Amino acid sequence: MRMTNGQVAVITGGASGIGYGLAETLADRGVRLVLSEIREEGLDKATASLAAAGAEVTAVVADVSDEASVRALADRTIAAYGRVDLVCNNAGVVSPPAPLWEQQARIWELMIGVKVLGVVHGVKAFAPLLIEQGTGHFLNTASSGGLAPLPDLTPYTTTMHAVVGLTETLDQELKRVAPGLGATVLCPGLVDTPLGQNSVALGAIDLQAGAPAALRNAAMRDAAAHFGAKLTPRAVAESAITAIEAGRVHVAPGSDVAERARARVTSLLADIAAG
Ligand SMILES: NC(=O)c1ccc[n+]([C@@H]2O[C@H](COP(=O)([O-])OP(=O)(O)OC[C@H]3O[C@@H](n4cnc5c(N)ncnc54)[C@H](O)[C@@H]3O)[C@@H](O)[C@H]2O)c1
């Protein structure tokens, strides 16, 4: 699907990082925005700076883990613009670094609620609108952690793998309905965003007194070991829009991502071939 002047895009988790990068990139193409976010203060600031740069933007506070909240977001979108062309299910948090056997049930519930059900709620609320139009696209943000293992982040990687599988299947389901419908999953390597700080603010990472520096250092060490240089949110957004326009189901920017995905797929195929 071409992204052009006058279209409408909804972006969840749009106040910061990759979501904000998507908003800037789409606004530059004349796309009208519904910027959605759970942190109201962040949303106000992001909306003001996009509007100051000339974007047409409607701000909606919504929690993607709450189905009614996302349904209300869809209603607000139609009330504001009467249509929707691109739905970016992007909101997310990261889990604290620890091996699987030390991860808390509370963190699993939060990650599944935001990352998996958040995307499901977005699809359920907006798919009927796209189907009625006969055209439209979903961009679901996962991670390179959805294409290959990332030790010490199982609640994160599990939900990201789910978003990859969900999107691949969704794309086929949508294409069965109309060729103008589709879905793309975004799987970047490490991106320069305040994901860690926002995850602390939203309670996904529970820092004990005295632990922050150690935890942050451990997380950074782990991340640096897995990923190459940090990407900018803007570069990630440009890659995502290019992939949507090319009709690709996957987009995975980052110098190290192909190598990690290849290692997983090679080992998977070898195991299958071995019977
Ligand atoms: N930063 C990275 O290195 C990286 C790499 C790969 C994938 N990702 C994924 O990209 C997505 C965006 O993350 P980011 O790095 O831009 O971080 P970010 O913290 O800058 O942006 C995420 C936004 O989502 C919002 N959010 C969190 N929970 C929400 C909820 N329940 N409802 C609505 N909004 C909510 C946050 O407030 C925040 O503004 C996430 O899904 C993340 O997992 C990030």
Image (spheres, rainbow, N blue to C red):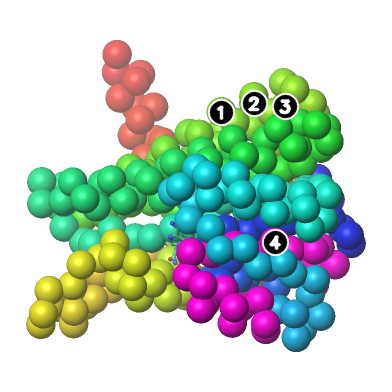
Tags 2 and 1 in contact by the CB under 8 Å rule?
A: yes
Split into 4 quadrants, where in the image is the C terminus?
top left
| Corner quadrant of residue 273 | top left
Query: Start and end of the magenta stretch?
Result: 27-49
Sequence order check, earlier mark of 2 and 4: 4
- From the image, state whether disc 3 or disc 4 is nearer to you: 4
> Would you say residue 262 sits in the magenta stretch?
no
Which amino acid, mark 3? Lys
Residue 264 percent coordinates (x, y) = 37, 40
Marks 3 & 1, CB-CB < 8 Å contact: no
Residue that mark 4 sits on: 34
Task: Look at mark 1 in the image and give the residue it sits on.
Answer: 169
Q: Whole-Å distance between the Cαs marked 2 and 1?
A: 5 Å
Residue 180 visible? The answer is no
- Cβ–Cβ under 8 Å for marks 2 and 3: yes
Q: Secondary structure at mark 1?
A: helix
Where does label 3 land, which residue?
A: 175
SS at mark 4 in the image: strand
What is the distance, in whole Å, between disc 1 and disc 4 at their CAs? 26 Å
Q: Is residue 35 above or below residue 77?
A: below
Front position in the image: 270 or 1: 1
Q: Residues within 10 Å of mark 4 (few under 14, many from 20)?
A: many
Q: In terms of secondary structure, where does tag 2 sit?
A: helix
In the image, what residue occupies the spot 72% across and 53% down? 77
For discs 1 and 4, the disc positioned in front in the rendered view: 4
Q: Which residue is mark 2?
A: 172
Please state the horizontal and vertical placement of residue 130, each as a whole percent of the image: 75, 37
